[in-house]
Image (cartoon, rainbow, N blue to C red):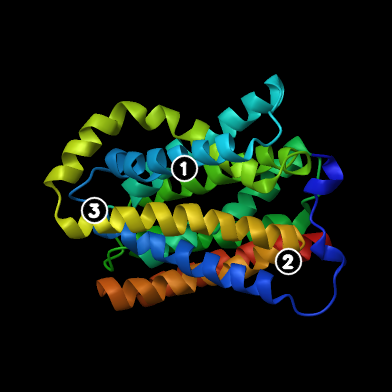
């Protein structure tokens, strides 16, 4: 497949794209729900076991896609890039996020994860030589202040929760992986890149599979159903609908819609798990997103 065939074509279209909008809504809903599902599964499953249950299954489905679709095979350098991005974005990201969510509620966790664009911009400053400027640093300070407030108020009594830093580490891993994926998405289909990342990223989790199977066997049926939901909807379908959105919309415009994930995750956590957000947590979440907006909007002016 040529490079031109892999590039988004819908950016040239005008008017309302119903398919792209539908794909975005599905992505927001499923990705937002994953934070609550993780909270439900933790306890019966350890953070590593939950990561293995989710992503080894997704990696298997990625392998099935690669065998059936036979997309262009990455060369050695691209394969190495996919491997590093996959390990960061799948194994390391999942273990850090799962560990953090043992004490950090679903809503605040989603706000912290969505600081990823700040780290992406900072990494692009060093790696790609992109401009950052005064507003970039202002936005970064605002986001970090919001994360600090969330960490201090996660349990409502202003005692610092170090697990919030683990979730922040997951956001950094996602940012590094995004930078590493960027050149690949210009040369390969988005679904193929996603499948490779899921497959290669799940490899470090394979040693945890035996223990994961034992834990799932001992867990209540509801936990197994939640794991199945996590694999199929937020992971597989969520990534596919996101790829559809990226194919039909400019990447920047599509990414702006993801600001809807944290408030949706907060609402789901409240309705499903009874997690009532604290005022400080809401203020911290608003600061985290405001900082991201400053970094992504004002720094371009």
Q: Residue furthest top?
A: 76
Q: Residue furthest front?
A: 68
Whether residue 217 sits left or right of residue 250 in the image: it is left
Of label 2 and label 3, which has the lower sequence position?
Answer: 3
Across and down, in percent, residue 100 comes to 34, 49
> In the rendered image, which residue does mark 3 sit on?
224
The answer to whether one can see residue 105 in this image is no
> In the rendered image, which residue does mark 1 sit on?
61
Looking at the picture, tell me which residue is in the foreground, 40 or 228. 228
> In the rendered image, which residue does mark 2 sit on?
253
Across and down, in percent, residue 171 comes to 52, 49
- Give me the residue at 40% from left, 65% from top: 33
Across and down, in percent, residue 104 comes to 33, 58
Which quarter of the figure has residue 268?
A: bottom left
Tell whether label 2 touches label 1 (CB within 8 Å). no
The answer to whether one can see residue 154 in this image is yes
- Give me the residue at 17% from left, 49% from top: 44
Of label 1 and label 3, which has the lower sequence position?
Answer: 1
């Amino acid at each position: 497949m040529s490079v031109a065939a892999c590039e988004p074509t819908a950016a040239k279209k005008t008017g309302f794209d119903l398919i792209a909008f539908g794909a975005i809504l599905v992505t927001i809903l499923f990705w937002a729900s994953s934070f609550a599902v993780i909270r439900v599964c933790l306890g019966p499953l350890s953070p590593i076991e939950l990561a293995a249950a989710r992503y080894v299954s997704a990696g298997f489905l990625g392998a099935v896609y690669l065998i059936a679709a036979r997309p262009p095979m990455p060369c050695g350098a691209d394969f190495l890039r996919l491997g590093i991005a996959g390990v960061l974005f799948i194994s390391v990201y999942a273990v850090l996020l799962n560990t953090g969510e043992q004490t950090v509620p679903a809503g605040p966790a989603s706000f912290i994860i969505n600081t990823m664009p700040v780290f992406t911009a900072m990494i692009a400053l060093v790696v790609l030589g992109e401009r950052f400027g005064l507003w970039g640093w202002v936005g970064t300070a605002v986001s970090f202040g919001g994360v600090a407030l969330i960490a201090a108020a996660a349990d409502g009594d202003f005692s610092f929760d170090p697990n919030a830093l683990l979730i922040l580490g997951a956001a950094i891993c996602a940012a590094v992986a995004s930078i590493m994926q960027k050149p690949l998405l210009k040369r390969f289909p988005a679904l193929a890149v996603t499948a490779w990342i899921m497959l290669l990223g799940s490899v470090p989790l394979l040693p945890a599979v035996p223990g994961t199977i034992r834990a799932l066997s001992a867990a209540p049926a509801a936990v197994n159903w939640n794991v199945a939901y996590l694999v199929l909807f937020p992971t597989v379908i969520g990534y596919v609908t996101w790829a559809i959105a990226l194919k039909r919309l400019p990447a920047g415009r599509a990414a702006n819609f993801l600001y809807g994930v944290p408030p949706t995750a907060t609402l789901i956590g409240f309705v499903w798990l009874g997690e009532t957000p604290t005022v400080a947590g809401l203020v911290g979440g608003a600061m985290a997103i405001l900082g991201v907006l400053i970094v992504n909007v004002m720094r371009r002016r």
